[in-house]
Amino acid sequence: MPAPPTTTAYISGDFTAARNLLGHGESEALALQLLVAKRARQRDLQRAVATKAAAMLAELGNQARAADLDLLVTLVELAATEAERERGRWGDATN
């Protein structure tokens, strides 16, 4: 997978194009264009990270599923402990 362009390279082209507007007193347009470029770059990076994460999970396969099950067991154990604590505090509702 090719590396995405750097943030500064991505934004500098937009800055050059938007600088012409600055000469006309439209600094707001420049700021807005820079923000749009930055947000587009963030979306590209998020997409790249999600793609890498999906590839890693596919490579891990059974190991990832086992880790998910371990986490689920831990959460169930925590919920059971909390239920026991609440039952001790409020009494058993079946009495």
Image (cartoon, helix red, strand yellow):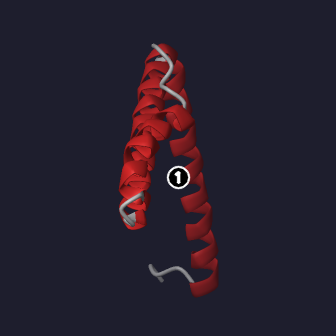
Q: Quadrant of residue 51?
A: top left
Q: Residue at x 55, y 52 (%)?
A: 75
| Front-most of residues 33 and 20 | 20
Q: Quadrant of the N terminus?
A: top left
The residue sitting at 44% across, 79% down in the picture is: 94
The crowd level at tag 1 (other Cα within 10 Å; few <14, some 14-19, many 20+) is few
Residue located at (53% from left, 37% from top)? 7
Q: Please tell me which residue lies in front, 66 or 45.
A: 45
Say left or right for 83 vs 46.
Answer: right
Does residue 42 appear in the picture of this structure? no
Position of residue 83 measured from the top left corner of the image (x, y, whole percent) = 55, 69
Q: What amino acid is found at the position of numbered circle 1 in the picture?
A: Val
* Frontmost residue, 39 versus 46: 39
Task: Look at the image and tell me whether residue 57 can be seen.
Answer: yes
- The part of the image, by quadrant, that contains residue 48 is top left
Q: Position of residue 74 (x, y in %)?
A: 59, 47
Residue at 45 percent across and 45 percent down: it is 15
- Rendered position, 12 above or below 75: above
In the depicted structure, whether residue 71 falls above or below residue 2: below
Observer-nearest of 49 and 35: 35
Query: Quick one: SS at disc 1?
Result: helix
In the picture as drawn, the residue positioned furthest to the bottom comes out as 90
- Residue lying at the far front of the rendered structure: 23
Residue 14 in picture, x, y percent from top left: 41, 42
How many dots with numbers?
Answer: 1
Q: Which residue is label 1 attached to?
A: 76
> Quick check: 69 above or below 80?
above
